[in-house]
Every structure is written in structure tokens, then in C-alpha cells.
Amino acid sequence: MKDLGWKPNRKSHVPLHKQIEEYIKGKILKGEWPVGTRIPSQRQLSDMLEVNRSTVVSAVDELAAQGLLAGKKGGGTRVINNTWSVLAADPPLDWDTYVQSGTYKPNMPTIQEINRAEFHPNIIRLGTGELSPHLLPHGQMHKIWNRTSNRQISLGYPEPKGDLFLRTALADHLQRIGIQTTPSSILIVSGALQALQLISVGLLHRGSSVLLEKPSYLNSVHVFQSAGMKLVGVPVDQEGIQPSLVCKYKRQYGGDLLYIIPSFHNPTGILMSEKRRHDLLATSEQQRLPVVEDDVYRDLWLDNPPPLPLKSHDKNGNVLYVGSFSKTVSPGLRIGWIAGPEPVMDRLADIKMQTDYGSSSLSQWAAAEWLSTGLYQDHLNQVRKELKYRRNSTIKLLEQHFGGVASWSVPSGGFYIWLHIIPSISMRELFETALKEGILLNPGTIYDRDADQYIRISYSYASLEEMEQAISRLSLIMNDLINRRE
């Protein structure tokens, strides 16, 4: 570039540095200076264009600020971007300002890493909390959709609380586990997470305190925090959250709501005992503390059915009962429900209509077919059998590869084993090293910041061959970290 063949017009009302800036932009836009091109030095440009060096510096600095150019020590100044948004005549919209101003909190960096890594090819997802694609009921779902030719299915918006046929089927389903309810006291939602979102914005105010188990799944999603609420963790024992500590923490930190997962808890796998459920419900009534009972894993018992839900003993309308098909049938259906006092369901239904005008009518119809035809129970029987085999196989692998360096309890249902690493190691380093080896972990810190020596192991997603490979390799990585520490 000894001769540019162009010089700024000194008679123009446009400042010289602006003319130079637009000239260089034009060269980049036309592809004459593609990304990676090294442009002449500031001294060379000032000589070529017959202007002061300070004029060139002003133009180059502005182009660098716009993201077109970048200087590199020893490498001169190069073109680094040629996108239209950057090359527009006016400065591009500063979306970063908008992004940082949003009220909804971003996921933790580790959660974002996990969400991205789940779709990497050949990754073994050792902590994913959903059914393996091999356990999803593809054949049964085809049978259900094939029935559409003989049925009149609504393709319009459903009524505010959801399809009446589905709510009626759910009322019958819930009565089988002791929950006496009617369709008017049930709201259909797009999965359990939406239930929590509706509760957070519809029933609580900014600054409210939510009591929950420590650790808890709720810490890994920011649904309540983004609504301006504080989460207060209450320690658990082998029977679940402790009622005496609920009272203590409510007095000490305040408490406007109690959130619990009593059946096959996420992430610990704990099953709350029947007595503990009675005591906890009594405590909530004494403390005038509403309860959100998240029971999405209830139907995934592997040894014996769990005790009846808290909601089955709720005579005062203290409990909002949340369920979902995402863990048992298919996350793709996006169908869940809330059962509770009718005025509360009316309030949440109104908010839901403001946000999405109702969950998918087709998904609701399919969910109703699952419940009303008996397919759901048949599918559950098969899933329980497969999950039990997977759980037992995973426990054997842990005994083989982690005996002496980790501890765990055998869950009686659900998806999860809460693995405690006994020697103190860097879990961040374990996460990163495992990821490089194609193994994706769910570290305990995403459920409780103090659980830095825990991993949530899921036996529901990865195949048994993948599980064997991952656990074997993970033990080698961990032992290497232990040896280096010593």
C-alpha cells in the first residue's frame, strides 16, 4: 500500500479525520481490506494523505472504538471486523447497555457453561436431570397422535386455567394420591418452572424471603431472585428439611414462602418421611407459612411408593402442589400443573394469560390422553424398571471406582445421587478437566455455594456404557488432582 490513490478534500466542510475514517470504512465494506489486513502505519498514512499524524490517529482511534480495527504490539493495526452493523454510517446500537439493564438475572457462569456443553457432540452428560432419549415413549406418543384423525381437537387458545378435559383427568389422577381437588382448583402451566415464575410474580412482593432446602434446585435457577426475592437455605437431614429449623430461620431471616421437594429431592435424592411431612405441614400452619410442594419426581419411585404428599393432608389451603410430565413422559410436552385454592389459581391464571395466553392446546390434549387411556401408568412401570437397573448399575460403578474417596446414599427414586468427594480438591479444576475429556458434570455449588465438595450424578440420561466410561475416567482425573495436591 505505497499509494492509496486518494487524498482528503481540504475544501470540504467534513473534517479531515472524518473523511479518512469514512474512506477506510469504505475500503473494508467493499472487501478491498478484508479482515486480517494490516493497514499502513500512522506515519505512513499521514505521509500518503498529506495530513498531520494527529489527524490519522483520531480516525484510527474512532475505527478501533467502533470495533473495525485493532492494534497489536509488533503486528501493526489490522482489520478485525467487517459486519454491516459495525459499518453503518451511524454508531451501532449499544445493546450491552440494554442487556445489562434487564431485570432477569443471568444464569451462573457454570450453568451457562453446562447449557452450552450439553449440545457438544460426543459429550457424556453425567448430571443431566431428564430421561434418556432411549427411555422416552416415542412409540406411545405416535399412537396418541394417530388418534387425532378420529377426534375433534381444538386448535385455538385454551381457557385461562387450561383444557377442561386435562384438568378433569388430573383431578382424578391427584385423588389417587390423596389430594382432593376439582378442575377449577387446577391450573395448567408450561412445566414446573413456569409454575414457580407465576408464583414469584403473582403472590409475592419484591423483598420477600423464600425458605428452601439447603442445598436446593431452586438455587440453580434465578426465578425468585430475578423477581427481587431472597432465598434462605434451611439445612436438611436424612428425612428432609427440619421443621424446628424452619421456625428458627423464619424468625431470624423472615419467611413469606416455603419451597420444598419432598419426594426424591433434587439434588440430594432424599425422600422425606411420612412423619416429617406431617410435622412440616403442622409447622407451616402454625407459622402461617404457605408451602410450594414441588412433586415432579413423585411417580419415579424405584423401591416403594413414597408417602402421600403434604397436599393430601392440607385442610386449610396452605399448600400449592406442583407437578409435571417433564420428568416422567417428555420434557418436550412442556405440560405441568398447580393445584391449590381456587382464588389463587384464578390469580395465577390471569397472569399466565398476560404472558403466553395459555400452554399449547395440542400438548394439553396429548397429556390428557396419556392420563385418561392408561398409557401413563404402563409407561411408568417400564420407566421405573429401567431406572432401577440404571441406579443399581451406577452404585456398583461408584463402589468400584470411588470407594474410599467419596460417600453417597442410595436414592429410592428419582434421578440423582449426591456424591460427596472426601479429599478436598478444586471442584472447578475437576469440572474443567472432565469437560476437556468429554464428561459434563453438575458441581454441587450450583445448588448450594457451600457444597464445594459435591457432584450431582444422574443415572437417568447417559447410557450405561457412557456411565461406565465416564465414572472410570472421572476417578482417574480425581485421583490425579488428589495426588498433585499431596
Image (tube, helix red, strand yellow):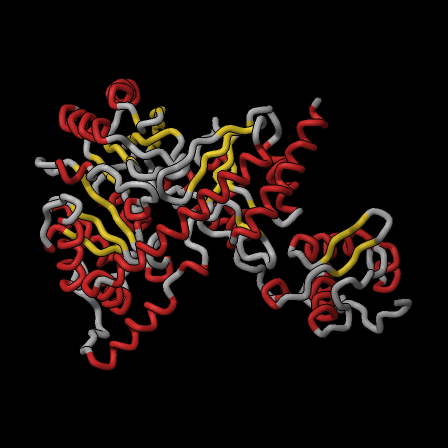
Q: Is residue 483 left or right of residue 352?
A: right
Q: Is residue 278 above or below residue 350?
A: above
- Residue 37, image x and y in percent? 80, 63
Q: In the rendered image, which quarter is residue 134 located in?
A: bottom left
Q: Does residue 326 show up?
A: yes
**Count of numbered labels shown in the rendering:** 0
321 relative position to 136: left or right: left
Question: Is residue 63 left or right of 44 when viewed as pictured?
Answer: left
Q: Is residue 357 visible?
A: no
Q: Residue at x 46, y 44 (%)?
A: 458
Q: With respect to residue 484, does 351 lie above or below?
A: below
When the figure is inspected, residue 142 is found, relative to residue 271, above or below; the finding is below
Q: Residue at x 67, y 27 (%)?
A: 482
Q: In front: 129, or 68?
A: 129
Task: Specify the quadrant that holds the N terminus.
Answer: bottom right
Q: Residue drawn at (45%, 60%), measured in percent from left and top?
A: 133
Considering every residue shown, the one lying at the far right of the view is 2
Residue 93 location (% of width, % of height): 52, 58
Question: Residue 302 or 47: which is nearer the viewer?
Answer: 302
Q: Quadrant of residue 234?
A: top left
Place of residue 464 in the rendered image (x, y in percent of width and height, measured from the top left): 52, 51
Nearer to the camera, 60 or 450: 450
Above or below 331: residue 369:
below
**Residue 247, horizontal then vertical, whole percent:** 24, 20
Which quadrant would the C terminus be assigned to in this image? Answer: top right
- Name the residue at 58% across, 65% down: 85
Q: Is 253 on the left or on the right of 287, as rendered?
A: right
**Furthest residue in direction bottom, as rendered:** 149
